[in-house]
Image: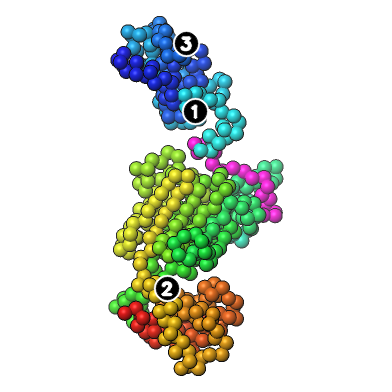
Amino acid sequence: MRNEELQLILAEGEGYKIEFKESLSTIDRELVAFANASGGRVFLGVTDDKRVKGITITNKLKSQIQDIATKCQPAITLSFEELQSQNVLIINVREGDDKPYQCSSGFYIRIGSNSQKLTRDEIVKFFKEEGKIKFDELINLKFEYDVHFDPGKLDKFLRLAGISKVLDDPSILVNLGVAEKQEGKVIFNNTGILFFAKKLQDIYFHTTVTCALYKGVEKVEVLDRRDFNEDIVSSIDGAVNFLKQWIPVRDEPTGTPQMKKVPEIPYDALREAIINAVTHRNYFEKGANAMVEMFDDRIEITNPGGLVKGLQPEDFGKRSVLRNPNVANLLHRIQYIEKMGTGISKIRTLMAEAGLSPVEFEFDTFFTATFKRPEREAARIGVKEIDVKFRTMLAREGVTEGVTEGVKKRLITELLYIMQNGSTTRSIIERIGRVSMATAERDVSYLKKLGLIEFEGPPKTGMYVLTDKGKQLILEEMH
């Protein structure tokens, strides 16, 4: 370092990465604070009021400082630089790779231009943020084996994982790494609770996956909402099925008599994003749920917790760092994930193959994957455009009894939904019109009598689709 540079640093004063020390007094605190933060430099031989007092630089002094750094827990890496003309020794402290670091008097971190000692709660928070404490590894004594454990969920997991049940349940749970035996009791960690609780909401409320369908492009009017919090696998499956209910599907020729059903957005891409949100969410954050939200123009899948500690933005989608390794391990056993960091690449590939816009990923305190929905021509059709023609049809077919103005508008809305989405069910019609099961049945009866819809498929899994007459009624208004 040149004298000119030192003068600039002295003019600016102490800061987040600069500390002036007149002597070795409490030097260990400064070393630990820099190692726990972003690294920094200690200028030994400079007073707090920016005066260069100087210090005798010897090998013994350097060895003494190295010894102090080595005695920190864990040892701190540093290097020296000498400004002999001013008798100033510069100690370069690297940001630690194995945080947190501790000296004999405690844990310290750099806050502005000061090295601040961490309180007990701050230490716990620091450990969590650095990934030293894993939520999925923590024991929860409130979860009781005889009260909260669901053996049926364990049996289902074993079937999915292809594991033969040759041991008793407690032994299997221990072997899976989700429980341990203490004084004759089976004690669960949070991974076991997330997978095998009878009702997860009885133990944790913040583990919910909330799904919502909105009208329009803003969070104003909610058309449908579901909260899933039975167990982690059911939450994933429930969220995927929620989207399948509402995502439009089109028929695509296959060269055979049977048409191929193609969803607006690939189901597998959405499923990967949902699994990612559940697997990598920050479960220490209890003020937010994982969210699956569907708007007219996009689908957003969000979870608390940005990028996992140790993963840089440029490494996103290329490397895999697990925030909840036990959770990931069990999902890997049932083939929900590959645990090789391929999920993001798979999403990108599926969207590209479908000819859709790339997914937008954002990560700050939350992680968000945004799927843009393709524009749908039928979405431009409104109630007013087919209102007159529909009224004429009702009168001609003699369908007038009980058909009020409100019913007419609701029937048109239901027709448009089927046009936009390709098909519907009676339960979906209930939610669209916010009506009872009996009213939805009556709406279906009206539309069938008019010859606008028909039922296709098996009785239990089939769907209502538009007839050619129904398509003509709407399409004529588009041109």
Q: Quadrant of the C terminus?
A: bottom left
Stretch in magenta? 130-148
Q: Nearer the viewer, mark 2 or mark 1?
A: 1
Q: At which x and y percent is residue 270?
A: 42, 60
Task: Report crowding for label 2: few under 14, some 14 to 19, many 20 or more residues within 10 A (C-alpha).
Answer: many
Q: Is residue 403 above or below residue 380?
A: below
Residue at the outermost top position = 56
Magenta region's main secondary structure?
A: loop
The one nearer the camera, 297 or 309, is 297
Q: Residue at x 36, y 70 (%)?
A: 376
Rounded to the nearest whole Å, what is the CA distance between mark 1 and mark 3?
21 Å
Q: Amino acid at mark 2?
A: Asn
Q: Which residue is mark 1?
A: 111
Q: Amino acid at mark 1?
A: Ile
Q: Which residue is mark 3?
A: 23
Q: Residue at x 38, y 60 (%)?
A: 372
Q: Residue at x 42, y 54 (%)?
A: 369
- Horizontal side of residue 380 vs 239, given as left or right: left
The one nearer the camera, 217 or 404, is 404
State which quadrant residue 59 falls in.
Answer: top left
Give the label on residue 421, or none: 2
